[in-house]
Amino acid sequence: MADLPPPVQGPTAKEKKYDRQLRLWGATGQMALESSHILLINSGPGVVGVETLKNLVLPGIGNFTIQDSAVVSEADLGVNFFLEEEHLGGFRAEHTCNLLKELNPDVQGSFITEPVESWLTQPDSLKPYTLILATAPIRPEILARLSAHAGASLIPIFYIHSVGFYSHFSIHLPPAFPIVDTHPDSETTSDLRLLKPWPELIQFAKEKTNALDTMAADDHGHIPYIAILLYHLEEWKKDHEGQVPQNYKEKTEFRTIVSKAARTNNPEGGEENYDEAVAAVLKSLNPPEPASAVKEIFKTPECVLVSRDSSSFWVIAHAIGLFYTKYGVLPVPGSVPDMKARSADYIQLQNVYKSKARKDVVEVLESVRFLERTADRKDPIDEKDVEAFCKNAAHIKLVRGRPFHVVQASETIEWGERAKSIAQNLTFPDSLVPLYIAFLAFDEFVATHDKDALGGAPKMPGETDAETDAEKVTGIAFKIADDLIKEAGTFVEEPDYSDLKTRTGEFVQELVRAGGAELHNIAALTGGLVSQEIIKAITEQYIPVDNTCVFDGVRSKTEVIRV
Amino acid sequence: MAEAIIPNLPTNLEGPRARWKYLDNILGRRGPFTDVDWVPGAAIIESLERAKLLVIGAGGLGCEILKNLALSGFKDIHVIDMDTIDVSNLNRQFLFRHADVGKYKAEVAAKFVEKRVKGVKITPYCGKIQDKDEEYYKQFAMIVCGLDSIEARRWINATLVGMVDENDEDSLKPLIDGGTEGFKGQARVILPTMTSCIECQLDMHAPRAAVPLCTLATIPRQPQHCIEWAHIIAWDEERKEITLDTDDPEHITWLFQKALKRAQEFNIPGVTYSMTQGVVKNIIPAIASTNAIVAASCCNEAFKIATSTNPFLGVPETDNYMMYTGDESVYTYTFQHMKKSDCPVCGEDNLSRPLQVDPNSTLQEFLDGLAERPEAQLKKPSIRSEQKSLYYQSPASLEEQTRPNLTKKLNELLENGEEVVISDPAFPTQFRYQLTFKG
Ligand SMILES: [Zn+2]
């Protein structure tokens, strides 16, 4: 063992505990989680919010607070895992908070038992929180207030239903929510620039394919496939007036040429590197054109007008936009997939790509520094951020957050620019838009019904009289659907219209059957979905739901709707 | 349509069902999708409480499954898991605390849920599913699986298919299976012999191609190649006398340093301790949220099967598989996976699958290939043809006797078009292939 370097520092206790998640969102994602403070406004049976928090306490969010003025009842013990018999009669906020805290000593938790109506009137009551979670049933004026606060302070807010076999959640993100680290599928991301090679890459290919015909068998079988393709592209151009293969037909023709160039007079009857080259033709011989969604980002007002207060995303995006305008391509990402090759050749090729990527980063960085000076920004952007941005420039994403529906008593629901597309979706036989409409109708019922004459808790449909309530809610849902069709300026013909009504009616009946009850399974599943989306919103990694998701536990299906 | 709901069952604010007030709304009322002859109420509650369920796995999915089943009103649950608790489990396996590290998962999980949810009985077994026989599996109404091992899934699947007796309705045990990897997962319901089984679906979960040994030995290019080299080659050369324990930090450190040194020789960047651990232990990223989604989906189906409160996945000729992806928005694809007539486990007639082979490849190469074939994935195969034993892993005498065949070419051992039968100690099934020579 004398030849080994001295012992290394193994992982820390924290790295060990969080190992399985750090492999997904890394140390920066973890840091973001740890500096968050999540507020849950709990109500109803109160399970889905607590299950959501469970999945956030475990991976180590910094802080959570539960606002809930309910007192623990027998019924809670049959549905909520974070309550015990001895808590009967105590505050649900306090005991769920304490049992959640047991899951992870690194997480701070607190609770508020004051009714939400009066608690919200205190100045700055919402100030400490970086993300808000509200569960149905909730009074529309409270939800509207929370939504307005989130909108004004640019923090995400989630609104959740979990009723019987169905659930729904909507996310209101800030109006500009950009993501650099979208974690694209590694197989779809290689950008090799075979149609726009730079001098060093051309030089590499020439070197590796020199005297191809007389090359020794073992050398020939180890030419990196990138060099093989570049070589044959040059040959092709000679016969095609300097043009590369233009269409599918030419590409398949080109592929046959490459395939025939493999040597078959060996025991294997072929060459692995040539097989790789052949397999790469169709996906690699595309012009390195950025996706339209990415080009759109360069044209957004935030990107065009970088100011002193712009976030670093917009400064870097602007700089990369300049790069794109100048060269017609994005910076080279710099990674090379594994391929049959000798170690030294592969490392050399890797360095060709890395150096080019580095060069592109330097150029973007210069623009960034220039922008910083002209906009008079204080803190310089970390070079690492510029590098990460350049590496993933082809996969950046901008989500435009928007407020969700807050259903007010006897007010028509507005769909705005989304009306047309949602109305169209409404009539598809498998669409879950009618389920979303059933939830809106549920909310309108809640907005207009109280549990008792004292105006205490809101009443949910089906709590006592399922039949009567189902009729009421069906009526509301039909009206919402009709209003949507009207706002979209369209018309649904028979039999589609009757089908739509049947499906909407069935969703409503199943919803009312539950009488506002949560089924633990559906609450747990929805808590899983919501916690996942919260992790995305906090870490600014992966791609969040935009902006509404419904789950049908009868048929085990989800649908994401932009409302 | 609203008449379908039976109104006004007494709301239980007190009495023995007070705790199940919410659940009873569903158990006590018809819905628009319940069968016409389904009767809500006491009988359904009784059958739910009587159903005996087996949960396989008490890890990330298992913890969720036990909690969910207990809060779905099931009273008699058994759980099997052979593992003990590791500190890296604590970011998602919420029934375990730091003080439980080293204890058996099944035992700690059972105790915790019994304490939290009064009235549920959870019987743990800390051991392997293979320790148990058909007599044991017969006692359960359903089996819910939350496993991370394909081998264990295939074993229980084949066992349950083998148990089905056409003349005994009770011999058919629905198998509900969940699996996750990072932000992705699936939940599926199998009615053994009636619908597509785990083996029918094996190619949905193709293994990652292994890196060829010659790449590891002579031309490494990736940091992972250097780690695999340290793991597969260097350890055996230098520390043969010590059994590698991937949970021993000293062993991982040794591999890491070996890999790092090799990487430096070849100028390969990127070898880290964490990557070494990941490659050597084949670590799959895992988070609480995906486990919650997949486990709850499995338990939702189990609840529907036990109570008929709504249609469930797995009814023949309907959807039986929900695929879940959560890294890019939220996406589910729920579909019917079709049963395969040539499935080696549930196929009606024991058909052999056609397979093209290179006649010049050796038997060893052919057997190595089986480990990577998506529909086979066999690690320790034994093989015989119609005429003779080609290679047997055990007993030792037979292994020794058949070992020389490994280096022979297929065309020296077999006729073109001959059928071979392959078995593997991990599975109670045989795989039949008809081998035709390429070219
Ligand atoms: Zn099968």
Image (cartoon, rainbow, N blue to C red):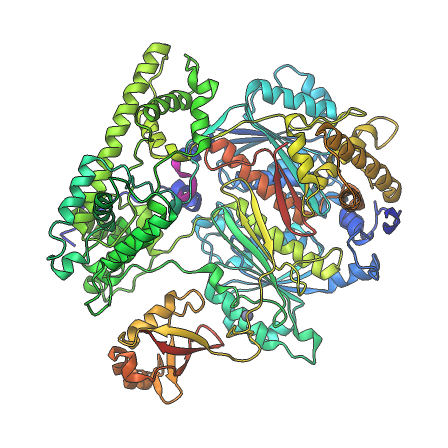
x and y percentages locating residue A213 in the rendered image: 13, 56
In the image, B285 versus B313, the foreground residue is B313
Our reading of the magenta stretch's main secondary structure is helix
Report the residue at 35% width, 83% height from top: B395
Question: Which residue is painted at 64% across and 20% down in the image?
Answer: A148
Q: Is residue B41 left or right of residue B287?
A: right
Magenta stretch bounds: A23-27
Give the residue at the far bottom of this rendering.
B387
Residue nearer the viewer, A167 or A227: A227
Locate ligand 1 by image quadrant.
bottom right
Q: Is residue A356 above or below residue A167?
A: above
> Where does the image place residue B251, in percent across and percent down from the top left?
28, 55
Q: Nearer the viewer, residue B326 or A133?
A: B326
Percent position (x, y) of residue B161? 58, 73
Q: Specify whether residue B48 is painted magenta.
A: no
In the image: residue B336, left or right of residue B426:
right
Residue positioned 69% across, 58% down in the render: B312
**Is residue A100 visible from the viewing direction of this image?**
no
Name which residue lies at 62% across and 52% down. Answer: B297
Determine whether B359 is above or below A520 in the image.
below
In this view, A448 is above or below B416: above
